[in-house]
Amino acid sequence: MPVGADGFRLPTVTEEASKPKIEVLAGPSQCDTFQTFVIQDEDHTLGNALKHILLEDPAVLFGGYVVPHPMERRIQVRIQTVAGESAVSVLKRSLLKLKQQNLAVKKMIQEEVERYKAAHPDHVQ
């Protein structure tokens, strides 16, 4: 899976021909501090984790997501922020924080696997 300089996954050849990974929904109620984003090829796994990260941010007044239809692999994330803070910047910051948390958990799991292998050499295949 190719990764870009910013740490986010790069699209594959087939994805490049399709929709972008994240789209901003346009509409009369959308403004800089109130945005709805459509994230393709994701489900409750990302949506729920992202919602919790968003709600920890003091700049967020509302953060939530929906899966429009169970047969579609996309989520809609709605973010409303305080004045002076854009929803796009909050989304980027929250995704980076979620990525950092996932990397920390991955590191902890790898350390525990190594510790287990060292303590139980008979059980390692």
Image (cartoon, rainbow, N blue to C red):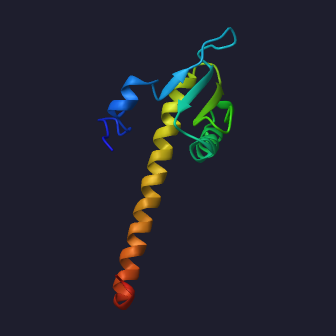
- Which residue is rendered at x = 60% and y = 13% of the image? 26
Q: From what the image shows, is residue 45 above or below residue 5? A: below
Instruction: Check the image and report above or below for 101 versus 96.
Output: below
Q: At 36% across and 76% down in the image, what residue appears?
A: 114
Q: Quadrant of residue 76?
A: top right
Is 71 on the left-hand or right-hand side of 21? right
- Residue 49: image x %, image y %? 60, 46
Which residue is farthest top? 28
In the image, residue 73 above or below residue 106 = above
The quarter of the image holding the N terminus is top left
Left or right? Give the position of 112 relative to 125: right
Look at the picture and state if 26 lies above or below 16: above
Q: Position of residue 48 (x, y in %)?
A: 64, 45
Asked whether 72 or 86 is in front, the reply is 72
Q: Quadrant of residue 9?
A: top left
Residue at x 48%, y 52% (from the top left corner): 101
Instruction: Give how far across and how far down residue 104 sits, in percent.
Output: 44, 57
Where does the image place residue 95, in percent across and percent down from the top left?
A: 50, 38
Give whichever of 101, 85 is nearer the camera.
101
Q: Quadrant of the C terminus?
A: bottom left
Q: Residue at x 61, y 38 (%)?
A: 54
Residue, far bottom: 122
- Badge count: 0
